[in-house]
Amino acid sequence: MQSVLHFILTLFVITLLALLVSYDRRNIRIRYILQLLVIEVSVAWFMLHSEAGLYAVTSVSGFFDQLMKFAAQGSNFVFGNMSQQGMAFVFLNVLCPIIFISALIGILQHFKVLPLIIRLIGTLLSKVNGMGKLESFNAVSSLLLGQSENFIAYKGILSEQSSRRMYTMAATAMSTVSMSIVGAYMSMLEPRYVVVAIILNMFSTFVVLSLINPYHPDDEPEPQLSHLHANQSFFEMLGDYILAGFRVAMIVAAMLIGFIALITAMNAMFSAIFGLSFQELMGYVFYPLAWIIGIPEQDALHAGSIMATKLVSNEFVAMLELQKTAAQFTERGMGILSVFLVSFANFASIGIVAGAIKGVDESQGNVVSRFGFRLVYGATLVSLLSAAVAGLVL
């Protein structure tokens, strides 16, 4: 009963925070929000407690574990078994597998498997979320194709979309994660929490968007959807996706180097001036949010610091920070915080999403840039809601 009351308090706080930046409070449709929450809580319980759900989560985790082993063969061939010697762990075990998984996504895309999955799941989602098919399809394609590559699939129709619909599309891309890096997350977090977070984020995104950006799909004309059908040979496509995976890996590597160096410098500067590191101070700022989503009080201050690290840098930096101190957390605190970390909700994502859209349609990219802060704000609420739902059933 106490956990249920705490969850109700969490819903109240998240709703209040969402309403502060809502575009149109009068058009919020409560029925769809309640419907999505019931489904989300049910899915979380099913995946974390029922035998069938645990089997499904374990199977997905095992599948990605096997993919990581295949990817390691390529890394070992090029880098001479350095990973087996414990050298360059992040580069070889976290970043390099992105290249292999990107290639697999390209193969599924080439043989039209992904468009079929996107349409099937997107159509089912559109039945329960009260939004249009485009928004629902976009949520699935963002997950399967990736935050940047996703908008190429909609290049023929982006120019026709209103700013409200563009906000929804950009927000779903920022609130989910790309399947190409799920294996990387699983090397740093307990795999079952990664799988659960991916599913919960999809529902949480629609709940938060229904509060921040409510509109009736009938008011937004449904475009003819045209997913990416590249006229390439199989090996042209494969080369493109392998190189795309390599670019993603290098971008993540550059961001890790830059952000970790900056955070280290800021920690030293704040320690010299205030006697507390930057991350310790941010822990106090995020402490209430950590507690409100159900993280135990003894974990909340440290968790708040890691949550802040994710927001100001990215989820990889935060996951690496959590890895170093995982033994200090309770099992419940570790699970809730892990779910919170699995998303692209950080300030760096504003540039990534806006840049990806601008590459397809410059004017719409500028539109997205203008509501960049509201995007990060909303995506952070999505992460808080998903973590709170996980906390309710853990």
Image (cartoon, rainbow, N blue to C red):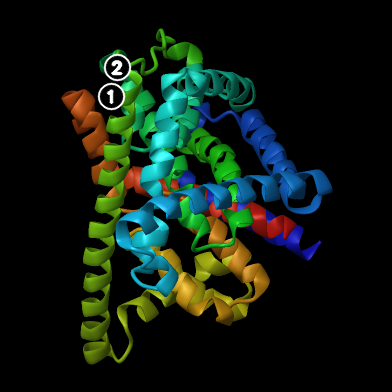
Can residue 342 be seen here? The reply is: no
Asked whether 134 or 255 is in front, the reply is 255
Tag 2–tag 1 contact (CB < 8 Å)? yes
Left/right placement of residue 157 relative to residue 179 reads left
Question: Amino acid under label 1?
Answer: Glu
Query: Where residue 47 sits: x, y (%)?
Result: 72, 47
- The crowding category of the residue bearing disc 1, from other C-alpha atoms within 10 Å (few below 14, some 14 to 19, many at least 20), is few
Q: Residue 9, image x and y in percent?
A: 64, 58
Residue 352 vs residue 131: left or right? left
**Is residue 154 visible in this depiction of the protein?**
yes
Q: Looking at numbered disc 2 in the image, what kind of residue is underneath it?
A: Gln
Q: Which residue is found at the position 80% from the left and 43% from the top?
A: 52
Give the secondary structure at mark 1.
Answer: helix
The C terminus appears in which quarter of the rendering?
A: bottom right
Q: Where is residue 280 shown, x and y percent of the image? A: 38, 80
Say what secondary structure mark 2 lies in: loop
Q: Which residue is mark 1?
A: 236
The image quarter in which residue 141 lies:
top left
Residue 80: name its quadrant.
bottom left
Q: Which mark is residue 232?
A: 2
Q: Residue 298 appears in which quarter of the rendering?
A: bottom right
Residue 284 at x, y = what percent?
43, 77
Q: In which quadrant of the rendered image does the N terminus lie?
A: bottom right
Q: What's the CA distance linking mark 2 and mark 1?
A: 6 Å
**Residue at 36% of width from left, 76% of height from top?**
279
Horizontal side of residue 159 vs 87, given as left or right: left
x 25%, y 51%: residue: 251
